Image: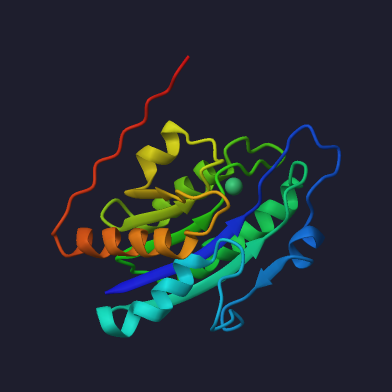
Amino acid sequence: MRLFAAALATETNTFSPLPTSLNSFKECVFVRPGEHPEDRAVFASEPLLVARRMAAAEGFTLIEGSCFGAEPAGTTRRSDYEFMRDEILGQLKQALPLDGVLLGLHGAMVADGYEDVEGDILERVRALVGPKCVIGVELDPHCHLTLKRVKLADVIVLYKEFPHTDTMERAKDVLDIVLNTLRGKVKPVMSLYVGS
Ligand SMILES: [Zn+2]
């Protein structure tokens, strides 16, 4: 079984005049494959870290992608977002064929031209991995959950605590559900109530 994990996260305040740039990520979290620390998660990389720790015991191969994270600020520059997104998509393409994908995202990231960044990432990931691959995502409860994400992902788990003290536990939930789906033990079904 082959799983891929990566992270790309920031919380965007679209009213903030300060754009989020590649430098904002470089000043916070900019970790390439092989550089991720052993002892701690770095900004939404919990799915990757949990999968790394569980891979041997659960009998799957983990292919690690990049992890990018920036402190909350304004809209992310389009080319900077596309650069990080395409780096992760390139790694994912190299890792094919895949049984599962684990993504650490925030859920309220906006880039120029991309109001639903997480939906855009999921759309491109799904196009590469195909319909059978199980995609699991961990999000912050401060996210803007969209129907697009619910349709494209198989599993979405939000942190349940604020302050966010349960990010590792929820990442474990994502991994468990993805693995149990792949083993045919569960068949996750998602729905979203969109209020007017
Ligand atoms: Zn939050």
| Quadrant assignment, res 97 | bottom left
Please indicate, yes or no, whether residue 93 appears anywhere in the rendered image: no
Q: Residue furthest left?
A: 185
Say left or right for 73 vs 88: right
Say left or right for 27 vs 167: right
| Quadrant assignment, res 58 | bottom left
Task: Please say which color scheme the image uses.
Answer: rainbow
Please indicate, yes or no, whether residue 71 appears anywhere in the rendered image: yes
Q: Which residue is depicted at the point 74% across and 46% down?
A: 76
Q: Is residue 83 above or below residue 114?
A: below
Give residue 162's position: percent from left, percent from top.
55, 49
Give residue 176's position: percent from left, percent from top.
29, 63
Q: Residue furthest top?
A: 196
Count of marks overlaid on the render: 0
Give residue 4's position: percent from left, percent from top.
42, 69
Give residue 86's position: percent from left, percent from top.
60, 59
Q: Is residue 98 above or below residue 21?
A: below
Nearer to us in this view, 118 or 56: 56
Nearer to us in this view, 131 or 21: 21
| Quadrant assignment, res 109 | top right
Say left or right for 135 vs 84: left
Q: Which residue is depicted at the point 43% across and 76% down?
A: 63
Q: Which residue is depicted at the point 43% across and 54% down?
A: 137
Q: Residue furthest right?
A: 17
Q: Is residue 128 above or below residue 73?
A: below
Q: Which quadrant: the N terminus? A: bottom left
